[in-house]
Structures are given as structure tokens and as C-alpha cells.
Image (cartoon, helix red, strand yellow):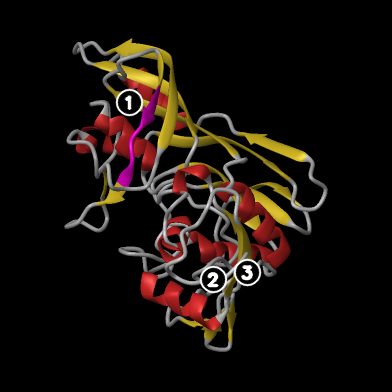
């Protein structure tokens, strides 16, 4: 949310996970903030006292599993004004702390590379008026994100306290996220796990790739059913559980198995053939704890009609 000409980042408490033990403090923050701030900027936070923890807090400090740090970044200037815009989306649940919505396909959650125009953030500001001041880059109410072509369940925070508690749940991997997707070809097993680190492509900044030097990424899948088209091509409908939440994680992991998501314009060579169906990746369900009551809240959507239309088209 914009205040004058500044965006304010919400403070947050973060705990070091076992797979990040041994990293420098500035490196660890770069990882957990998912590139939302530069390493130089993070170092300035540490030196100015905006990062607090046990013992002497220095950029070079090696973090240990279980250590907790409090990050309270200073306000950041940002020229990209998010203007409220009326937008049509379904609200699944709403109270004073949060909202759960059905994000439509084809719209970015917030401004970013290639998406500087109207985004879901503008629609959220119009619909709810009062939202948390945003995450580390001033994105109002955004606790997590879905890719632009992906639709499904999305969680929105309405105040800084809710934002902080919900963000911690995502960071600590206590939020359960399940997706549904149609794949070109079938995975090697009926159920399995892809444990492969992901990193941004060094030449194409809109693309991610499997890279051993990247961030740990784990996706579990289960084949619901397979379908052989009249042309003899095999497709698989799969349920996917995200144990981590990396950019394009499902799309990259499934493509690495040789079975990209149907309609994927970045990781599939056959995307144009199925363009009319869109990206057949759907955020089907989300489960988390309410930031105030602690109650477990679960939301699940029925697959969109285009999933059924695609399956029917395989018969023709």
C-alpha cells in the first residue's frame, strides 16, 4: 500500500531451516526473501540494525538451524504506483484478518518483469480497500503468488500482523498446497517425488531451470488417470503437492521429467497446439492456520471447465 511516495515493507520473524544451515546471514536472507531485495541492500539492513537475532549480527555470520531472526526493513522508494482497479474474482472467504479468493487465469498477481500494467494487486486494493502494507516490495496483501497463467486458491492478508503470521507459515512450510495439472506424456512412476534445486536462467530472466546450485525444491506427484488420444499421444492428469514454493516450480519439475504441463508457453514446445485451453495448471486447494484463532482452514475448488473440455478434445 502506498503512503506518500513510499512503500513500507512489513516486518517479519524468520527461523533458519535445516537445509539452509551454514549459509552466511546475508546469503540466507537473500534465499528466504526470494530475490525481493539485493544482497547489498540486505547487508545495509544488517549493518543499520534492521536485522536482529541472537549474538553478534553481521552479514558474514553463519546461520544455524533453529535460529530466529527479526527483520524490520526501512521504507523503500518505489516508482511503480499500484492503483485500485475494479476486477472480477470470486471471494471464497473473508474476515477482518484475511481473504481467500479464486484467482483468475491470465493475470499477474503483482507488477514484475513483463507485467507492469494492471495486476491482481490493483483489484485487491479496489475490492478490500484495507490490506496489509505488503511484503518486502510493498505488494499489498500478497502473502504468496501464483504464476500469471495459473488460476486457483490465493490467500490475502488484511493487516500487518496477519501478513507476518501467514508469511511465517509459508516460510516454515506448514501451509499445504495441492495443484492439479494435465501433462504432455506420463511421469515415470504412478507416484513420486522430484527433488531438484531450481535457479533462474542466467540469460533468460523470465525462465527458471533445474540447477544443483539453486534453491532446494521438492514436488510430489500422483497420477490420477492417463489418457491416450486418437492420435496415440499419452497425457496424464496429476495431483501435485508442493513441499517448497519456488517460481515456476511445478512447471520446471514436470518439464525435467519430460512431461511438461499442457499449454506451457515457456517450458513446452507444443504450447501453441493447446493454446485455446490455457495453461492446464490449477491451484486446487490450500490449508493453513488462521493467524489469530489458530484454527486450521482449508479451501478446495472444483477443476475449471476447460480441464474437462481439454479431456473431451482428446477423443476427437
Which of the two residues, 278 or 313, is positioned nearer the viewer here? Answer: 278
Q: Residue at x 47, y 41 (%)?
A: 244
Which element type, helix, strand or loop, lies under badge 3? loop
**Is 196 included in the stretch rendered in magenta?**
yes
**Quadrant of the image for the N terminus?**
bottom right
Q: Mark 2 and 1 residues: CB-CB less than 8 Å, in contact?
A: no
Count of numbered tags: 3
Residue beneath label 3, please? Answer: 11
| Residue 101 placement (x, y as % from top left) | 61, 48
Direction bottom: furthest residue: 4
- Magenta residues span 193-198
Secondary structure character of the magenta stretch overall: strand
| Residue 240 visible from this viewpoint | yes
Give the spatial CA distance, label 3 vs label 2: 17 Å
Residue beneath label 1, please? Answer: 183
The tag on residue 159 is none
| Residue 112 placement (x, y as % from top left) | 38, 65
Direction front: furthest residue: 55
Residue beneath label 2, please? Answer: 57
Horizontally, residue 132 falls left or right of residue 215, namely right
Q: Earlier in the sequence, mark 2 or mark 1?
A: 2
Q: Residue at x 41, y 29 (%)?
A: 181
Horizontally, residue 160 falls left or right of residue 46, namely right
| Residue 159 visible from this viewpoint | no
Amino acid at each position: 500500500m502506498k503512503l506518500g511516495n513510499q512503500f513500507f515493507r512489513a516486518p517479519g520473524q524468520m527461523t533458519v531451516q535445516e537445509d539452509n544451515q551454514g549459509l552466511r546471514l546475508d546469503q540466507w536472507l537473500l534465499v528466504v526473501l526470494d530475490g525481493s531485495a539485493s544482497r547489498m541492500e540486505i547487508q545495509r539492513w544488517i549493518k543499520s540494525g534492521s536485522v536482529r537475532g541472537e549474538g553478534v549480527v553481521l552479514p558474514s555470520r553463519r546461520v544455524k538451524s533453529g535460529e530466529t531472526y527479526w527483520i524490520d526493513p526501512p521504507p523503500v522508494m518505489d516508482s511503480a504506483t499500484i492503483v485500485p482497479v475494479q476486477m472480477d474474482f470470486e471471494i471464497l472467504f473473508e474476515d477482518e484478518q484475511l481473504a481467500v479468493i479464486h484467482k483468475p487465469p491470465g493475470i499477474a498477481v503483482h507488477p514484475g518483469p513483463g507485467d507492469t500494467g494492471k495486476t491482481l494487486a490493483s483489484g485487491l486494493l479496489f475490492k478490500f480497500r484495507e490490506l496489509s502494507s505488503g511484503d518486502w516490495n510493498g505488494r499489498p496483501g500478497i502473502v504468496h503468488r501464483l504464476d500469471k497463467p495459473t488460476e486457483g486458491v490465493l490467500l490475502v492478508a488484511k493487516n500487518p500482523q496477519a501478513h507476518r503470521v501467514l508469511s511465517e507459515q509459508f516460510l516454515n512450510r506448514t501451509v499445504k498446497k495441492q495443484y492439479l495439472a494435465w501433462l504432455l506424456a506420463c511421469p515415470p512412476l504412478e507416484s513420486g517425488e522430484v527433488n531438484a534445486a531450481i535457479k533462474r536462467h542466467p540469460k533468460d530472466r523470465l525462465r527458471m531451470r533445474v540447477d544443483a546450485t539453486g534453491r532446494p525444491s521438492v514436488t510430489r506427484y500422483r497420477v490420477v488417470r492417463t489418457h491416450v488420444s486418437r492420435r496415440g499421444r499419452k497425457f496424464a492428469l496429476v495431483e501435485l503437492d508442493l513441499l517448497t514454493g519456488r517460481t515456476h516450480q511445478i512447471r520446471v519439475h514436470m518439464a525435467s521429467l519430460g512431461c511438461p504441463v499442457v499449454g506451457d508457453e515457456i517450458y513446452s514446445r507444443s504450447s501453441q497446439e493447446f493454446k485455446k485451453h490455457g495453461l492446464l495448471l490449477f491451484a486446487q486447494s490450500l490449508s493453513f492456520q488462521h493467524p489469530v484463532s489458530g484454527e486450521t482452514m482449508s479451501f478446495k475448488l472444483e477443476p475449471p471447465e476447460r480441464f474437462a473440455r481439454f479431456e473431451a478434445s482428446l477423443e476427437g
